[in-house]
Amino acid sequence: MEWGIVLVWAVFVGAWIWALIDCIRVPDDRDFRSGTKVIWVIVIVLLGFIGAIIYLLAGRPDGSTRSALGSGTSPSDPPGPPSVPPGALPPPPAG
């Protein structure tokens, strides 16, 4: 019985910590679906596990933003130069 309570508590605390770290790592307030980083950190800290669930449902950036976060770029960054497939350029002049 005691191990079950400890396990449930550990899952709640783990989800709370994960949501807090996830929120803090978002680089720009515009990436959130609603609110700002400060608001979401306050909600998660004050409401604990319930705040983490609310953040995941209402504030966490969607998948397209999350993939950009992992690459170190922002969705608002301009695209890089186009890639050229091998063999598409003519060989250098002989000299």
Image (cartoon, rainbow, N blue to C red):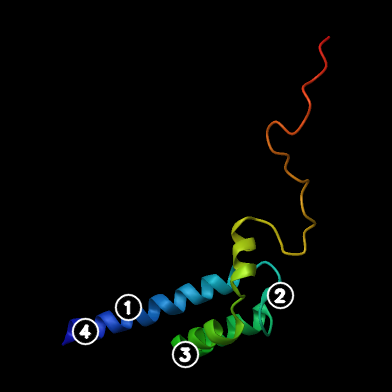
Q: Amino acid at mark 1?
A: Ala
Question: Where residue 81 sits: x, y (%)?
Answer: 78, 46
Element class at badge 1: helix
> Which residue corresponds to the image point at 32% horizontal and 83% vertical from the top-left?
9
Element class at badge 3: helix
- Among numbered discs 4 and 1, the one appearing first in the sequence: 4
Question: Where residue 54 sits: x, y (%)?
Answer: 53, 88
Structural distance between the alpha carbons of marks 3 and 1: 15 Å
Q: Residues within 10 Å of mark 3 (few under 14, many from 20)?
A: some
On residue 50, the disc is 3
With 32 as the anchor, is 50 left or right in this view?
Answer: left
Say whether marks 4 and 3 touch (CB < 8 Å): no
- Among numbered discs 4 and 3, the one appearing first in the sequence: 4
Q: Nearer the viewer, residue 25 or 31?
A: 31
Q: Is residue 95 above or below residue 17?
A: above
Question: Where residue 18 sits: x, y (%)?
Answer: 47, 73
Say whether marks 4 and 2 touch (CB < 8 Å): no
Structural distance between the alpha carbons of marks 2 and 3: 22 Å
- Among numbered discs 3 and 1, the one appearing first in the sequence: 1
Residue ID for mark 1? 10
Residue ID for mark 4? 4
Q: Nearer the viewer, mark 1 or mark 2?
A: 2
Residue ID for mark 2? 29
Q: Amino acid at mark 4?
A: Gly
Outermost residue, top direction?
Answer: 95
Q: Nearer the viewer, residue 45 or 91?
A: 91
With 16 as the anchor, is 4 left or right in this view?
Answer: left
Element class at badge 4: helix
- Among numbered discs 2 and 3, the one appearing first in the sequence: 2
